[in-house]
Amino acid sequence: MSAVKMTDVSIMIRKQEKKMTEILVKKTHFSFGEIERLLKLYRERSGGETDKLDRTLFREFLHDCFNMTDDILMDRIFKFFDQVNDGTVGREEWIMGLNVFLRGTEDEQIEYCFTIYDLNGDGYISKEEMLTMLKNCLVRQGLEEDGDEGVKDLIDMTLKKMDLDKDGKVSFSDFEATVKADNLMLEAFGPCLPSNRTGELFMQTYLDPMEV
Ligand code: CA
């Protein structure tokens, strides 16, 4: 009896997901098949539960599929995905987040990276925020013996390049203009996009081949 019920429930969920997918195709850069694959992955990563991908599970996903290890950045990425801010990434949030993360246009990804790096959300990437992120980054690379001096030099260099209006912090328009002139600056304060080899592998697995 309970086996029959389980089947009913899963048929219901499938039906509901098909509807959701049809809506999401219109709202994202993904095809129907891509969304289906990404929702299947969602089920795998959330232990088969719907709308229950919490911070820990989400961070495990970022680590396993994109080799990410930076606590601060992974938490910021989680916050970006968790739009409703209820401590879990639901299926729709999952697809909408991945839409920018995997398939975002240049403008969408510039906005995304800026949001990630503006740790306190005040509209600027301050020196303190840079220090927090770059220090963490150098520690992970085993370069912390250069100490604060190394990080401060790096911040000065970055500000020189990014702080176009010379107010001592990086605004969105500073960030946008710098990245448009030099795309390598997009992830200036640490990895937050699937731009490494592991990320490429993920894209090949889950996304349709790009039409050239
Ligand atoms: Ca800030």
Image: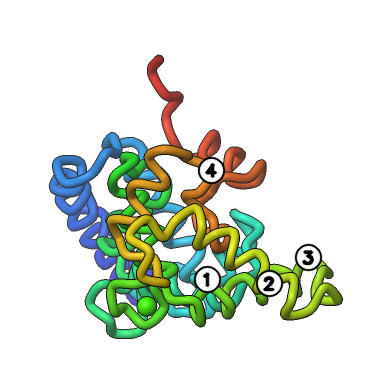
Residue that label 2 marks: 151
Q: Residues within 10 Å of mark 1 (few under 14, many from 20)?
A: many
As drawn, 71 above or below 180: below
Q: Residues within 10 Å of mark 2 (few under 14, many from 20)?
A: many
- Who comes first in sequence, dot 2 or dot 3? 3
Residue that label 4 marks: 184
Residue that label 1 marks: 73
Looking at numbered disc 2 in the image, what kind of residue is underneath it?
Answer: Val
* Quadrant that contains the N terminus: bottom left
Looking at numbered disc 3 in the image, what kind of residue is underneath it?
Answer: Gln
12 sits to left or right of 147? left
Residue that label 3 marks: 141
> Marks 4/1: CA distance?
18 Å
* Quadrant that contains the C terminus: top left
> Marks 3/1: CA distance?
15 Å
> Marks 1/2: CA distance?
18 Å
- Who comes first in sequence, dot 3 or dot 4? 3
